[in-house]
Amino acid sequence: MAGGSAIRGSRVGAGPMGEAERGEAAPRFFVSFWCSRSHESKPSFAIEAEVPEEWDCPRCGLPAGTDKDNPPMPPKIEPYKTHLAYVKERRSDKDGAAILQEAIDKLHGN
């Protein structure tokens, strides 16, 4: 006996998986969602489920809505800011010069 694998020749999820084993599927309906790149996706929902206003497009990842002519706008992506950029937002050049001079004086022992 080579290998000794008890589950040889099978894979995860293999085997009979019909409605008899899982039970009957809930009644479903499909809703069309469109993103700003005109991709359409049609996820299915259970009859009693609440349909969300937005759905992530499976092709591009942008938000999609049910109105084909007026899809949601893509989110605004903020560019990466360095620590220095945040400091410059909080301090003026005059404040920065004063802090620098104070640090220099401290180093020189004044």
Image (cartoon, rainbow, N blue to C red):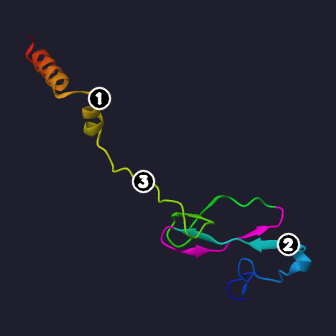
Q: Residue furthest front?
A: 69
Tag shown at residue 27? 2
Q: Is residue 41 left or right of residue 16?
A: left
Q: Which residue is mark 1?
A: 90
Q: Look at 52% across and 73% down and name the residue there.
A: 59
The magenta stretch is 36-48
Q: Is residue 12 above or below residue 105?
A: below
Magenta stretch: residue 98 in it? no
The one of 29 and 70 positioned closer to us in this rendering: 70
Residue 29: image location, x then y, percent: 78, 73
Q: Residue furthest top?
A: 110
**Residue 14 location, quadrant:** bottom right
Q: Look at 55% across and 69% down and name the residue there.
A: 69
Tell me the crowding category of disc 1: few under 14, some 14 to 19, or many 20 or more residues within 10 angstroms, Cα based: few
The C terminus is located in which quarter? top left
Q: What is the C-alpha distance between the residues marked 1 and 2? A: 57 Å
| Magenta segment main secondary structure | loop
Magenta stretch: residue 44 in it? yes
Residue 11: image location, x then y, percent: 71, 81
Q: Which residue is mark 3?
A: 76
SS under mark 3: loop
Q: What is the C-alpha distance between the residues marked 3 and 1? A: 23 Å
At label 1, the amino acid type is: Arg
Q: Earlier in the sequence, mark 2 or mark 3?
A: 2
The one of 58 and 102 positioned closer to us in this rendering: 58
Q: Earlier in the sequence, mark 3 or mark 1?
A: 3
Q: Earlier in the sequence, mark 1 or mark 2?
A: 2
